[in-house]
Image: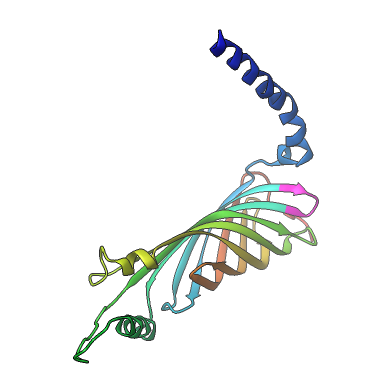
């Protein structure tokens, strides 16, 4: 009977949440979101302390949540290696922490590879409609930074360099409608998370399920 009473008491709040959930959903305009376009992008990225490389990204556009405000979910990957001077700085720091009475201790960490996978969402403001649409926005993403190398495998150094954290992004660019369902764009982006920050410039291609915004406009 105690278990039954507990289940009944627990069911009432759940029913209340379900009844009010639709209202909250609508107040946040989440009911307006629907998948309107898919696309991909790529371009140079220059992470701090890491050799420049190429970033690859996919995105899903869920349309307007409010007038001129769009919700876009993204996933990005890049891989590279730490710059030689960054590795040397790490070697010197390790040498300082080691009590070397002979003065002959050396460190040769070699190449340390690093990659980042970032998944999250952007809010983008577009001041005008039409076939050419500039935008500016920002977002929150989860970053998974992974470092690996023969000399650091399984060590505390690898553990210290690996990181999973939330980050923030600022973005701006322009989208252009090329055909009824096809869009092209250029995007500049800056991502910031603990341990890694980087700017990137990307060429963007997008497929719109319905007629692309501004198609046929002068």
Percent of width and height locating residue 36:
64, 45
Residue 75 visible within the image = no
* For residue 183, side relative to residue 118 (left or right): right
Drawn side of residue 190 relative to residue 107, left or right = right
In which quadrant of the rendered image does the N terminus lie? top right
Residue 68 as seen in the image, left or right of residue 116: right
Q: Is residue 68 magenta?
A: yes
Closest to the observer: 30 or 19? 19
Residue 95 in view (yes/no)? yes
Outermost residue toward the bottom in this view: 103
Count of numbered marks? 0
Q: Is 6 located above or below residue 79 in the figure?
A: above
What segment is highlighted magenta in the picture? Answer: 64-69
Residue at 75% x, 42% y is 28
Residue 7 place in picture, x, y as percent: 58, 16
Q: Kindly identify the residue that appears in the image at 72 percent across and 23 percent down.
A: 16
Q: Residue 69: percent from the left, percent from the top?
A: 75, 54
**Residue 4 in which image quadrant:** top right
**Point 48% across, 77% down: residue:** 48
Is residue 212 within the magenta segment?
Answer: no
How was the colour assigned to the protein in this rendering?
A: rainbow
Q: Mainly helix, strand or loop, the magenta region?
A: strand
| Relative to 110, residue 216 above or below | above
125 horizontally vs 14: left or right: right
Give the image location of residue 110, x and y in percent. 26, 79
Query: Depth check: 118 or 15 in front?
Result: 15
Q: Quadrant of the C terminus?
A: bottom right
Q: Which residue is painted at 31% across and 73% down in the image?
A: 112
């Amino acid at each position: 009977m105690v278990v039954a009473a507990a289940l009944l008491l627990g069911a009432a709040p759940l029913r209340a949440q379900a009844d009010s959930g639709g209202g909250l959903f609508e107040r946040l305009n989440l009911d307006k979101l629907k998948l309107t376009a898919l696309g991909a992008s790529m371009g140079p990225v220059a992470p701090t302390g890491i050799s420049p490389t190429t970033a690859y990204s996919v995105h899903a556009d869920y349309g307007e949540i409010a007038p001129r405000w769009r919700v876009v979910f993204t996933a990005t990957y890049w891989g590279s290696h730490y710059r030689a001077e960054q590795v040397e700085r790490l070697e010197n720091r390790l040498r300082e922490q080691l009590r070397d009475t002979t003065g002959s201790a050396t460190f040769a960490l070699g190449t340390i590879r690093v990659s980042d996978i970032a998944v999250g969402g952007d809010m983008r403001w577009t001041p005008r409609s039409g076939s050419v649409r500039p935008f500016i926005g920002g977002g929150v993403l989860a970053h998974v930074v992974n470092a690996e190398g023969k000399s650091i495998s399984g060590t505390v150094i690898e553990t210290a360099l690996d990181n999973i954290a939330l980050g923030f992004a600022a973005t701006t660019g322009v989208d252009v409608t090329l055909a009824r369902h096809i869009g092209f764009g250029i995007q500049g982006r800056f991502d910031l998370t603990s341990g890694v920050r980087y700017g990137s410039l990307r060429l963007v291609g997008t497929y719109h399920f319905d007629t692309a915004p501004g198609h046929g406009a002068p």
